[in-house]
Image (cartoon, rainbow, N blue to C red):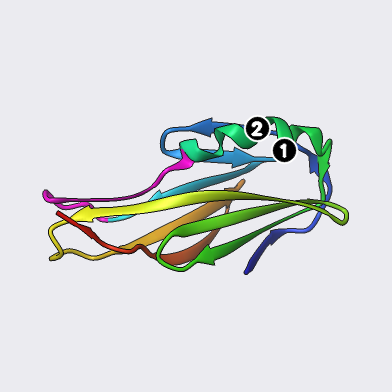
């Protein structure tokens, strides 16, 4: 598990196709794509959590945990309350290419990264 920050701020969430922002931390995923593959994080899976995150009122800590071969969970805390936001990651290819995905969490000029391995779905 990787700690991203440990200070109080307003609980808010913004979900887009290729990024997710929670309380000022922007999450994106990077992968050197080639012609016959698609390795990605499905950030739109966070949309159903919008109300729950905002109901926390404030966020005191955010941590990220890799879920082996499936994706990652962003844990959003308000004191002892914890909400897990699971983001599935997918790897569609012919088996020849890399299954690595780099999760990037950006806050201002500070970037924190976590390497993920995504299970192959070979076509």
Q: Quadrant of residue 79?
A: bottom right
- Crowding at dot 2, Cα within 10 Å, few <14 / some 14-19 / many 20+, comes out as some
Name the residue at 53% across, 47% down. Answer: 27
In what element is the residue under mark 1? helix
Q: Could you say where residue 12 lies in the image, as x and y percent from the top left?
A: 71, 34
Which one is nearer the viewer's eye here, 107 or 8? 8
Name the residue at 87% across, 56% down. Answer: 80
Which residue in the rendered view is the most extreme toward the right?
79
Q: Which mark is residue 74?
A: none
Q: Are marks 2 and 1 in contact (CB under 8 Å)?
A: yes
Query: Relative to residue 120, is residue 82 drawn left or right?
Result: right
Q: Which residue is mark 1?
A: 53
Q: Could you say where residue 117 lies in the image, as x and y percent from the top left?
A: 37, 67
Which one is nearer the viewer's eye here, 110 or 73? 73
Query: Relative to residue 1, is residue 28 drawn left or right?
Result: left
Quarter containing the N terminus: bottom right
- Crowding at dot 1, Cα within 10 Å, few <14 / some 14-19 / many 20+, comes out as many
User: Does 68 appear above or below 57?
Assistant: below
Q: Could you say where residue 115 lies in the image, as x and y percent from the top left?
A: 43, 67
Q: Which residue is mark 2?
A: 50
**Residue 42 part of the magenta segment:** yes
Query: Relative to residue 62, is residue 96 drawn left or right?
Result: left
Quarter containing the C terminus: bottom left
Name the residue at 42% across, 33% down. Answer: 17
In what element is the residue under mark 2? helix
User: Does 69 appear above or below 55?
Assistant: below
Query: Relative to residue 100, is residue 64 drawn left or right?
Result: right
Q: The magenta stretch spans which residues?
A: 32-43
């Amino acid at each position: 598990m990787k700690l991203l920050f440990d200070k109080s701020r307003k609980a808010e969430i913004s979900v887009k196709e290729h990024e997710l922002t929670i309380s000022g931390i922007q999450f994106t995923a990077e992968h050197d794509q080639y012609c016959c593959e698609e390795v990605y994080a499905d950030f739109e899976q966070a949309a159903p959590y919008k109300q729950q995150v905002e109901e926390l009122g404030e966020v005191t800590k955010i941590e990220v945990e890799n879920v082996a071969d499936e994706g990652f969970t962003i844990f959003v805390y308000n004191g002892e309350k914890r909400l897990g936001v699971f983001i599935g990651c997918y790897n569609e290819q012919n088996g020849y290419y890399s299954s690595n995905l780099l999760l990037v969490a950006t806050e201002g000029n500070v970037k924190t990264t976590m390497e993920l391995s995504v299970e192959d779905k070979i076509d």
